[in-house]
Amino acid sequence: VAAASYARGRPLPAFFVRKQTKEHGARKLVEGLAPGETLAGKRVAVLEDVTTTGGSATKAIEALRTEGAIIDRVITVVDRLEGAAENFASAGIPFFAILTAADFR
């Protein structure tokens, strides 16, 4: 998404959240910020390729909130329709799926 936005002349800042810190490099869960840049007070969208229950995104959200980010929404390319929408709704986080498992039947 970040590369496509840059190519279209409307660059979106981007970063990624690791599942766990590495033993080398920056040793951070949130990687890809410019030197000195923080997420404090910034509204962010979490983007996933495939979402089942939302567990991975929830862990990423926890790491982002620890960094001071404000979670605006979660967007997934494919929702497997196995509970993510309900889990995010109960957490008060807007959730949007581009496609769902039903689109492939």
Image (spheres, helix red, strand yellow):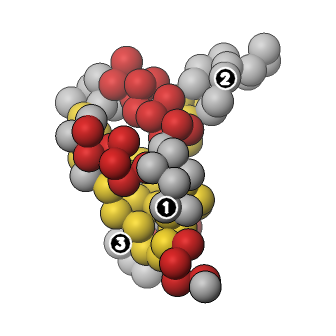
Q: Residue visible at 78% across and 14% down?
A: 23
Task: Find disc 3 in the rendering and name its residue.
Answer: 10
Disc 3 element: loop
Amino acid on which disc 1 is placed: Leu
Spatial separation of the CA atoms under disc 1 and disc 2: 26 Å
Label 2 crowd (10 A; few <14 / some 14-19 / many >=20)? few
* CB contact under 8 Å: marks 2 and 3: no
For this view, does 99 lie left or right of residue 105? left
Q: Earlier in the sequence, mark 2 or mark 3?
A: 3
For badge 2, the amino acid type reads: Gln
Reading the chain from its start, which is encountered first: label 1 or label 2?
A: 2
Query: Which residue is painted at 43% across and 81% down in the image?
Result: 8
Residue closest to the eye, 63 or 78: 78
Q: Which residue is mark 1?
A: 81
- How far is the residue under mark 1 from the one under mark 3? 32 Å
Whole-number angstrom distance, CA of label 2 to CA of label 3? 31 Å
Q: Residue at the right extreme? A: 24
* Residue 19 x, y percent position in the rendering: 64, 30
Q: In the picture provided, is 72 more to the left or to the right than 100?
A: left
Residue under label 2, please give it: 20
* Circle nearer the viewer, 2 or 3: 2
| Residue under the image location 56 percent in, 52 percent down | 52
Mark 1 residue element: loop
Does the residue at mark 1 contact the one at mark 2 (Cβ under 8 Å)? Answer: no
Q: Residue at x 27, y 35 (%)?
A: 91
Secondary element at image label 2: loop
Q: Is residue 18 visible?
A: yes
Instruction: Mark 1 or mark 3: name the one nearer the start of the chain.
Output: 3
* Quarter of the image that includes the C terminus: bottom right
